[in-house]
Image (spheres, rainbow, N blue to C red):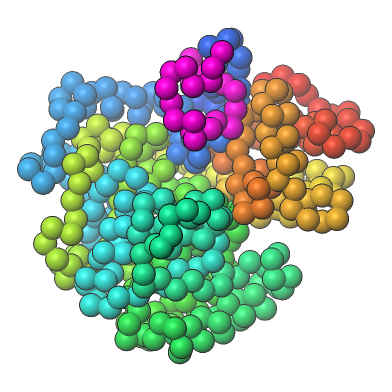
Amino acid sequence: MNDNVHHLSPLLRQSSDILVESAQGMYVYSEDGGKYMDFASGIGVLSTGHCHPRVVEAAKDQIDRVVHAQYAIMKHQPILDLSDRIVELMPDAIDSVFFSNAGTEAVEASIRLARQATGKPNIIAFRGCFHGRTMGSLATTSSSAAVRQGVQPLMGGVVTAPFPDTNWYNMSEDEAADFALRELDYILQVQSVPMETAAMLIEPIQGEAGYIPGNTRFMQGLQERCNKHGILLIMDEVQSGNGRTGLMWGYEHFGVEPDVVVSAKGVASGFQLSFMAAPAELMSRALPGSQGGTYGGNAVACAAGLATLDVIRDEKLVENAADRGAQLRARLEDVQSRHPEIGNITGRGLMIGTHLVDAHGKPDGDRGAKMLKACEHRGLLMIRCGPWGGNVVRWIPPLIVSAEEIDWAVDQFEAALVETGGGEQPAAIRNTG
């Protein structure tokens, strides 16, 4: 059958061959009767799993009341309640929230806010970070060539600084931090002087680059420089936020407090919702008309967001992400001891990347593609990332994942390593989900 018979764009390629019929909790069920444990989570969106009963109930109840009350025209209770809940989770100085649909929109809003509120033109971004595909956020993105290719020139006023990737630089955390900060100081001296730098925009734990974490020395160094020079520190928590890393926000691992936070993905369990949070005083310095959008803060999405935050709190999913993340890393390190093709394991909590390399230690994107198919055939759904052809297999299950499900998934992953690269099948492999 022609894959495009239903007229989807040929550029919309799927990483699996699944045609989903339904999904619940950790599992996806396909039209042909297949059952798959979902460790992709819609790219980290399904924090409470598929169709969590409390989220579904909240959305259904809101649909019966009002589906869309455009927030430039009128307010609705879910958007008011959700803004209050988000502020409760923010640093003390942040007391104002702007809602949009996707992470890239929230990033765009943060760039507009930074430039207008400070009167400065430049944004410093960091190599390897992914901030979105719309033209402003894309200008700050450098996770791979594919997302930028063929659309240059991009928005001006963006300078890219090094990120302290210890594996890439073959340095310790302190060495990588000192190197990146030294290079940043040089940028502030010769490329984007403080009087022209509105903000530094960064993922505390990089997503598409391969789940590369920052470190305390580096992140605190950023904050010191921002505070000294009157530069805003913007944290992109689109993928790392909402409990994913074992703390509510990724930046909390490093003892810093950003001026602006943007987030999306796991905040509403699959409903389209993103936000930018900042001090009201800072927001008030931007220009009228600079924040808006037809669908941002949709009533059903906000109701789902409230229910999601309730479930994360009541079911202790942040704590579960920390515990299951520690278990996952320990299991993967054990697998790595038998399989040198796992060159590196990165990330925090339930945001873990396994970096595949060839016999020469070079990134192996082809092996990554084979691994996804082998895992799929064993009932495990995963996705890839990384700048070297997708050589990083990422682990981002719903935050509801159990210890038994972690063990089963790692068993299938190791079996797939054997299947795609040879070697002896471990005796402990279990082939049922």
State left or right for residue 188 relative to residue 271: right
Q: Is residue 262 visible?
A: no
Give the residue at x 36% y 64%.
155
Kindly report the secondary structure that dominates the magenta region of the rendered protein: loop
Region rendered in magenta: 1-23
Quadrant in the picture for the C terminus:
top right
432 shown above or below 77 = above
324 shown above or below 9 = below
Q: Position of residue 66 (x, y in %)?
A: 15, 27
Q: Position of residue 67 (x, y in %)?
A: 19, 28
Question: Which residue occupies the extreme right position in the image?
Answer: 424
Give the residue at x 60% y 38%.
383
Give the residue at x 72% y 35%.
371
Give the residue at x 15% y 25%.
65
Q: Is residue 323 magenta?
A: no
Q: Nearer the viewer, residue 19 or 225?
A: 19
Question: Which residue occupies the extreme bottom position in the image?
Answer: 189
57 shown above or below 177 = above
Q: Is residue 20 magenta?
A: yes
